[in-house]
Amino acid sequence: MKNKKLLILDGLSELALAKDFYQGCLQAQIDAEYCDLESLPRRRLYFVSKFIGKLKSIFSRRYAINFAKLARTDPNAIKKAIMTSSPTHILVFRYAYRFIKPQVLQSYARALNCKIYLYDTDSCNLFPDQNEFIYFIEKELPIYDEIFSFSKVATDFFTKTRKLPAIYFPYGSNPVTREPVQARPIDVLFVGKASFRRIFLLEYIKDKVSIYGNRWNRSYPMISPELQNRIVNRTVWGNDLTDLMLQSKIVLNITNSNFYCVETGLNLRIFEVLATGGFLLTDHYEEIAELFEIGKEIETYSSARELREKVEYYLNHEEERIQIAAAGKKKFYELYTWEQRAKDFSLKVGLSDQP
């Protein structure tokens, strides 16, 4: 009998999500390989065909059919990666259609009698582009034996409306071994890109918040001088992000507007904060309340006024804030390290027989 093996095809390599999941697989002693789809050779004459396709789509107004920007990778390179690995299971992160035609990818998997899965990490970001989202659900999603989605709303849509095999599968994060700074000099930390919703909310706590992220300077005409003074206009990732969270009394999460408008999708920041033992204050919706006990493991807000009130309350109630952060950290290490998420995945798809 062929040994069970997982091949991870990463369609989101600008983030470390798939790489971290891969490392979690190795820690869980799951036989796995990793392939970055973005690093593979491009399809011949890709840019020429992309330009021609865009012209056709403009004049025909049938962009959903033409989709010139799709399938940019040489399919033979993907085929070689799959055949060389010879997996029994393939897990695609984000989507495949921008790299290879989904039906071609499916044919490669079927040639090896290999199961193929999707970790849907981005469907909510496709909502604003109706044509692209329709292409995704009609052309790509049906090729998978099962769809794992970070979004409960997306999972319900896939199963109930589209009759697709999908399950809700929240993110995880990496353990953090460093200890927090004792004094925690930052009152409230927010890290992320500027958006209208984020600006409006942050104006309510402009005397308490420290903001890190890129492109905030482009929004300065809409931002008060007081809030501008709280902004460090640079991207923060990895160890720098962890260092900032370890220095913060409260770490604030304001979800992407595309997610928040449908009240779905626990983003990576939630799990990153809990991994550090930080106190998390995030938007409230039912999905997060199903995973964490509000007021005991994390805290949430539903309005700008409530955000302001809870920031003031928890800055003035240190002991309660520390207790909630400790309980959130405990829940994270029980259920949401990438090693544990990899174990959960492997059980669901039959890669392993024991938890």
Image (cartoon, grey):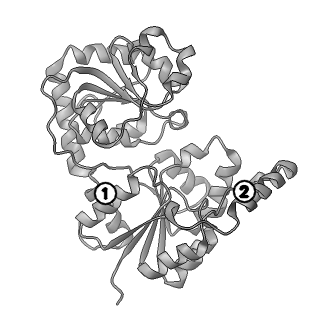
Residue where numbered disc 1 is placed: 341
Horizontal and vertical percent for residue 67?
Answer: 72, 56
Quarter where residue 289 is shown: top left
Numbered disc total: 2
Residue 292 at least partly seen? no
**94 or 331, which lies in front?**
94
In this image, 17 relative to 71: left or right?
left
Q: Distance of mark 1 from mark 2, alpha carbons?
A: 34 Å
Asked which secondary structure carries label 1, the reply is: helix
Residue at the image point whose x is 58% and y is 60% from the top: 163
Question: Given this view, does label 1 or label 2 mark the residue nearer the observer?
Answer: 2
Please identify the quadrant where the C terminus is shown.
bottom left
Residue lying furthest right in this view?
59
Left or right for 219, reference 349: right
Q: Which residue, given by chain and number where applicable, does mark 2 sit on?
A: 67
Which labelled disc corresponds to residue 297? none
User: Do we see residue 268 in this rendering?
Assistant: yes
Residue 4, percent across and down? 34, 79
Query: Which amino acid does the dot numbered 1 rest on?
Result: Arg
- Residue drawn at (48%, 77%), measured in percent from left and top? 82
Where is residue 26 drawn, in percent x and y? 27, 66
Q: In this view, does 223 lie above or below 120?
A: above
Name the amino acid, label 2.
Phe
